[in-house]
Image (cartoon, helix red, strand yellow):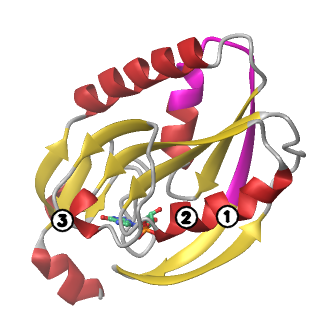
Amino acid sequence: MYEDIERVLVTEEEIRAKIKEMGEAISRDYAGKELVVVGILKGAALFTADLFRQITIPATLDFMRIVSYAGTKSTGVHRVLLDLEYELDNKHVLVVEDIVDTGLTIRFLMDYLKPRNPASLRVASLLDKPSRRKVDVEIHYKGFEIPDEFVVGMGLDYNEKYRNLREICVLKPEVYTRQG
Ligand code: 5GP
């Protein structure tokens, strides 16, 4: 796996420290509130698990699965493959994403979840690629801003591979021509 990596953008230690910080901020902000953490599968599965472990107040965990991405290009079309198990009425909802790129997925999720009447609706994302934004979205808890490069690791894949890398990495260009 590591032979396909050109360089590491964010190390395992940096990720661990940042997630701890984010967990502390979330625990402070939602103290005394009914918090529902919504992980977006599959990309945010690993980040959601790590972040949820760092939340020190009572909270529930739910997941959604959205498809929107083919290869390295966003199609801008979203489909819900798995919806939430529980109602959101009067709950404080925190959507957890792996990366915000164009912002279209977060925009779709906000529009999809708002009608369910949550008390509040916020977003936590491990990564942010601000230079690629097409729609304006607010990220309340942000891990790392990264340049406009396709990254893998920590749950993020290329054709379903590399999700189990512990760092955020850029792949060698020949990987895309080999598998693309
Ligand atoms: P957006 O809708 O903001 O353009 O894209 C969000 C989704 O696109 C993310 O949840 C992720 O699945 C995918 N994505 C965007 N940039 C990258 C990237 O650099 N690497 C990978 N593996 N997925 C990405």
x and y, in percent, of residue 174 in the image: 13, 80
Q: Is residue 161 magenta?
A: no
Asked whether 124 or 43 is in front, the reply is 124
Q: For the residue with label 2, is its CB less than 8 Å from the closest atom of ligand 1? A: yes
Residue at which label 2 appears: 107
Residue 102 shown left or right of residue 38 in the figure:
left
* Residue at 15 percent of width and 60 percent of height: 3
Q: Quadrant of ligand 1?
A: bottom left
Residue 111, label in figure: 1
Residue at which label 3 appears: 148
Residue 35 shown left or right of residue 131 in the figure:
right
Label 3 with label 1: CB-CB less than 8 Å: no
Q: Which residues are the magenta region?
A: 51-64
The quadrant in which residue 108 appears is bottom right
Mark 3 closeness class: few <14, some 14–19, many ≥20 residues within 10 Å: few
* Residue at 57 percent of width and 22 percent of height: 53
Q: Secondary structure at mark 3?
A: loop
* Residue at 81 percent of width and 53 percent of height: 84
Q: Earlier in the sequence, mark 3 or mark 2?
A: 2
Asked whether 75 or 175 is in front, the reply is 75
Instruction: Tell me the CA gap for discs 3 and 2.
Output: 20 Å
* Residue at 22 percent of width and 82 percent of height: 176
Q: Earlier in the sequence, mark 3 or mark 1?
A: 1
Q: Nearer the viewer, mark 3 or mark 1?
A: 1
